[in-house]
Amino acid sequence: MKRICCILGLLLLAIPQITYGAISNQTIHWGFKRAVNEQPVEAGAMYDQLLAKYGAFYKGDPSTKSISLTFDSGYENGNMPKILAALKKEKVKATFFVTGHFLESQPDLAKQIVKEGHIIGNHSWFHPDFTTVSDERIREELEKVKVRTKEITGQKTMKYLRPPRGTFSERTLQIAKEEGYTHVFWSLAYVDWNINQQRGWQYAYDNIMKQVHPGCIMLLHSVSKDNADALEKAIHDLKKRGYKFKSLDDIKKA
């Protein structure tokens, strides 16, 4: 009997651990009250403390008129060339959070993103809700995007992660940190991802201008034609308001 117990104990030790014990896996859906009158958004003390614990952030310095442009790029819908052209013309660098689908279907655009000085971040390979999959699956999702990005573009490091679907937990924050990632959320967003409900460039422009605030991290979806059509004018007019565009690296250093 003692021998059997020892064997069982060894077998249990060999089983990969897929949870973090006391660390919560309660699903959190990122959200906040939208900014008005250029007042920075607040997620609340509880979320601020949780994100700070893992080095995550959703806005930059609220005392400076800075903006960081980020795009979620799950797939290409014909708008990326116009987006990249606007960024190039306005001399603005952005971060593109890509999935495996984007990398495999649009390698030339991925190369262009990096060549033109933008950052590629991780949005997972298959875009699952991380709170519903194992630790190992999360690590695999992140590793595949990082490796394939390097193969295609030559980008040597990948340090920023935007969680698929905007869902996360303390457990997923912990895993990402262990893999060398910083979670980047956002402080400005609107419904722009539904390609069947595009409303025209004015809709995108108005949402950007109404919600912008000092230290803004802006989330746009690159599949949106509205965003592509509004981007150049929005950037130009935000500069006239005194805003400067900074990369996520600038925020991370601050």
Image (cartoon, grey):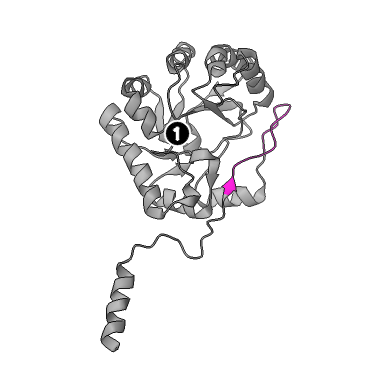
Give how far across and how far down residue 47 sits, in percent.
61, 49
Q: Main secondary structure of the magenta part?
A: loop
Residue 68 seen in this snapshot = no
Which part of the image, by quadrant, shows the N terminus? bottom left
- Residue 35 among magenta residues: yes
What x and y, as percent, mark residue 26? 56, 55
Residue 207: quadrant of the picture = top right
Nearest to the observer: residue 121 or residue 225: 225
**Residue 168 to residue 59: above or below:** below
Q: Which residues are magenta?
A: 28-41
Disc 1 marks which amino acid?
Asp
Residue 88 lies in quadrant: top left
Where is mark 1, residue-wise? 249
Does the rendering let one see residue 42? yes
Identity of the residue drawn at 51% across and 44% down: 56
Q: Is residue 42 magenta?
A: no
